[in-house]
Image (cartoon, helix red, strand yellow):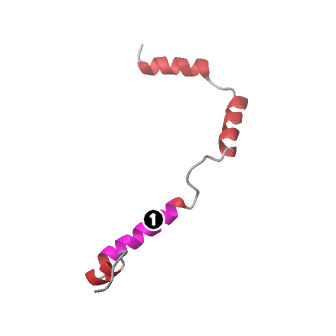
Amino acid sequence: MSLDDLLDEWGTRSRLTAREAEAVRAAVVATRQPGLDAGWWNDLMGQVSASVIRATVLPDRARLALQPGWSGA
């Protein structure tokens, strides 16, 4: 007997009813997970894009001026 056969047999014995499956689905959809908000990825990609543009487009002296602590001397 293969692993696939064993998993298939287990799945047949352990299958949720339609009502149980719907209860699980509803609980997952209704529960807001802690962590990152929906705008996190968009904000991150905006920062990454701006950094890439600065690194590839700006002249060296202009890029240096954007660094914290730059005095211009």
Q: Which residue lies furthest to the bottom in this view?
A: 73
Mark 1 Cα-neighbour bin, 10 Å: few <14, some 14–19, many ≥20: few
Left or right: 68, with 35 as reference point: left
Q: Position of residue 5 (x, y in %)?
A: 46, 18
Residue at point 35% right, 76% down? 69
Residue at point 61% right, 46% down? 33
| Vertical position of residue 58 compared to residue 18: above or below | below
User: Could you say which quadrant of the image residue 19 lies in?
Assistant: top right
Residue at point 58% right, 56% down? 37
Verify whether residue 36 appears in magenta.
Answer: no
Q: Where is residue 12 in the image (x, y as percent from the top left)?
A: 58, 20
Which of the image's four quarters has the C terminus?
bottom left
Verify whether residue 46 appears in magenta.
Answer: yes
Q: Please report the bounds of the magenta region as a residue range.
A: 41-55
Q: Label 1: which residue?
A: 45
Left or right: 4, with 9 as reference point: left
Left or right: 17, with 68 as reference point: right
